[in-house]
Amino acid sequence: MERKELYVDADQGQGFAKISEALEAAGQFKDMEVVIHIAPGTYRERLEIRQNHISFIGTDAKQTKITYSDGALDIMPEGDKRGTFRTQSVFIDADYFYARHISFCNEAGQGNKAGQALAVYADGDHLIFENCRFDGHQDTLFTAPLPRQEKQAGGFKGPKEFAPRRVGRHLYKDCYIAGNIDFIFGSAIAYFENCELFMKKRTSEVSGYVTAPSTYEGQKYGYVFDHCRFTSDCPDGSAYLGRPWRKYAKCVIIHSELGAHIRKEGWHDWDNKEAWDTMFFAEYDNYGAGAGNERAPFVKMLGEEEAASYTRENVIGF
């Protein structure tokens, strides 16, 4: 596939001043791979990527930031609340998207004031994020698709509310992902390799939950975290590794460092004992103050042979 290079640099006046302008120009090259080089800076833009084979390339994720500040509790012009799935700073509805050295942020604030606030809504197959940062509070990173059914009418209001559901594969490599309540959630097959998952402190007895998968019934894999670091500025024993957004949730954590903020039971069932027989939360060879053998009764501790099957190649195939 041929490649087209585009450049965004608002400060130097070279190329495009806004990332959205470069994305619009990319529409002229739909049969090519379009690589958008983004200079250091803070880009306050709400972006939509709907074209396959788009790449965002920065130079340093701490210096190249895409951010917006929409929250679910915002009141829309028509008078209703914005809702979770209209808050994203960046919406990806495409395949073969690649990002490197980019920060994706939502600066709406804590969930008790702003509600859910997505930095990224990622819906597509073969999505790769390398050396990227995702920063928010509640629901930072949504790994689409949506669950098959909503629990409340209008709960999925947003760009894919009525679209066919399609499970994609995502890779997050050497990334930093921060938040507190369910800050990685959704139904995708997602592999997290050598990432840092930072739990932000909030004024509550429970600081938060790292994951809330909604894996589809019959899907072999959900989330896998391999050689990751679960860190925090929260009090010791105040956070969970995850809870099931839907009853077939799957999340496996292997070879990872778990900080002291992780509670001894590790995982939460979202007060749904009926999900014990259908969800799959598992661990292997984890270490650190938050690791241990006093996990909740529904948690599986894998053996060596079982854990060996959770390779990146097996889970996502790239």
Image (cartoon, rainbow, N blue to C red):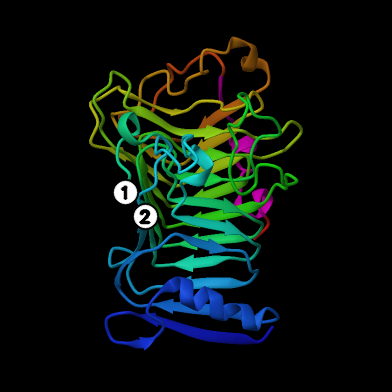
User: Could you tell me which residue is drawn at 31 percent across and 26 percent down?
Assistant: 207
Residue 290 seen in the current view: no
Q: Look at the picture and state if 259 lies above or below 189.
A: above
Q: Find residue 225 and name its label.
A: none
- 81 vs 236, left or right, is right
Q: Quadrant of residue 128?
A: bottom right
The quarter of the picture where the C terminus appears is bottom right
Q: Position of residue 111 (x, y in %)?
A: 35, 33
* Quarter assignment of residue 197: top left
Query: Where residue 299 sits in the image (x, y, percent)?
Result: 54, 21
Mark 2 crowd level (few <14, some 14–19, many ≥20, 10 Å Cα) = many
The disc, 1 or 2, on the residue closer to the chain's N-terminal end is: 2
**Residue annotated with mark 2:** 68
Determine if residue 105 is in view.
yes
Question: Residue 300 in magenta?
Answer: yes
Snapshot quadrant of residue 213: top right
